[in-house]
Amino acid sequence: MRISRLVPAVVVLGTILPIAAPAGAAPAASVGGGELVFQAEAAAGDLTQNDLYVIRSDGSHLRRLTTTPDRHEFGPAWNATGTRIAFWRTPAPFGPGAVWTMRADGTDQRQLTHGVDARDPVWDPTGTRIAFTLVGPDGFHLATMRAADGGDLRVLTSGPDLDFEPAWSPDGTRLAFTRGSQQGDAGDVYLLDLGTGAVRQVTASPDYDHQVAWSPDGRRLVFERDVPTASSVWTVDPDGTHLRQVTSGPYFDTGPTFSPDGRRIAFGSNRTGTFLDDLWAVNTDGTGPRLIRHLPDSESFPDWT
């Protein structure tokens, strides 16, 4: 199966689909306020290196947060107050992940996990716990820990299914995540009730549904759906109703996230080139696609605060 963020390279395949949005656009004057943190991949000697950057949602004030030779930083996520960022780091070219946090300016970097393969961190609404993907010999599972020091590790799921890329609900009661299997379904969106432990399926598609995130009011989920020739952004209610495709075309639109006001969705895309060179934003109904910024390196998986 294919699991996003396990292999940093993106391969663009295939055929041309109908275009639903312009391939080029002027930088956005305003797309919802706040800042986006994202990962960007660039050449580093014989290898590549992924580092983390922050940019305002109007495309200005680009700032680099990490620069770690022979290391990759992936999957950045803001806490609710926008004061700290969680991410996971691996040795290059790739290896076991470790969850870290840092201040919004890149300082005070703290490693929270040791001796395990930990990926895809996300904060709870209070900023006191972090959920993440725990990779072990028996598969991929969801786990949480204290955000301050990585203590009080709690494994939430088990069994043969592959559970990864958690997203904490704004009210703190549920985790949305992707569940796949080594043989069979590439992945669908599920919900875990943290109070009861009950798991419920949200999407059921032969395609690969993943990279799920919540709207600020908790009433919608946004996710990426992959087919062999493209990736697109979709939304759905947490109960599985009102499924809607937001973007389409011969593009790889990846890692969607809602704006703070819930009216826009940001995502990485290859809309102006071969690689994921752009950050874009679009209205939640699919109208008004706007280029936030074109950068020369491959970037994706933004998170908006």
Image (cartoon, rainbow, N blue to C red):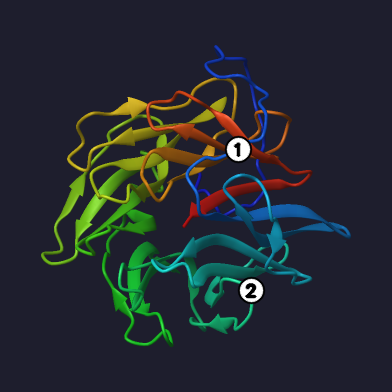
Are the residues tagged 1 and 2 within 8 Å (C-beta)? no
Q: Residue at x 74, y 72 (%)?
A: 68
Q: Residue at x 23, y 51 (%)?
A: 191
Q: Is residue 234 above or below residue 161?
A: above
Q: Quadrant of residue 64?
A: bottom right
- Dividing the picture into quarters, in which one does residue 125 lie? bottom left
The answer to whether residue 267 is left or right of residue 143 is right
Instruction: Describe residue 210's horizontal placement relative to residue 237 as left or right.
Output: right
- Of the pair 94 and 56, the residue shown nearer to us: 56
Q: Residue furthest left?
A: 196
The residue labelled by disc 1 is 29
Residue 181 visible in image: no
For marks 1 and 2, give the CA distance: 26 Å
Mark 2: few, some, or many residues within 10 Å (few <14, many ≥20)? some
> Where residue 190 sits: x, y (%)?
26, 48
Q: Position of residue 111 (x, y in %)?
A: 55, 82
Q: Decide if residue 217 is on the left or right side of residue 289.
A: left
Residue that sits furthest to the front in the current view: 29
Looking at the rendered structure, the kind of residue marked 2 is Gly
* Residue 133 % position (x, y): 41, 64
Q: Nearer the viewer, residue 292 or 98?
A: 292
Which is more N-terminal, label 2 or label 1? 1
Q: Secondary structure at mark 2?
A: loop
Check disc 1 and give the amino acid type. Answer: Ala
Residue 103, horizontal then vertical, whole percent: 56, 76
Look at the image and tell me whether residue 210 can be seen: yes
- The residue at which mark 2 appears reads as 106
Depth check, front residue: 104 or 167 = 104
Residue 245 vertical placement versus 131 (above, below): above
Q: Nearer the viewer, mark 1 or mark 2?
A: 1
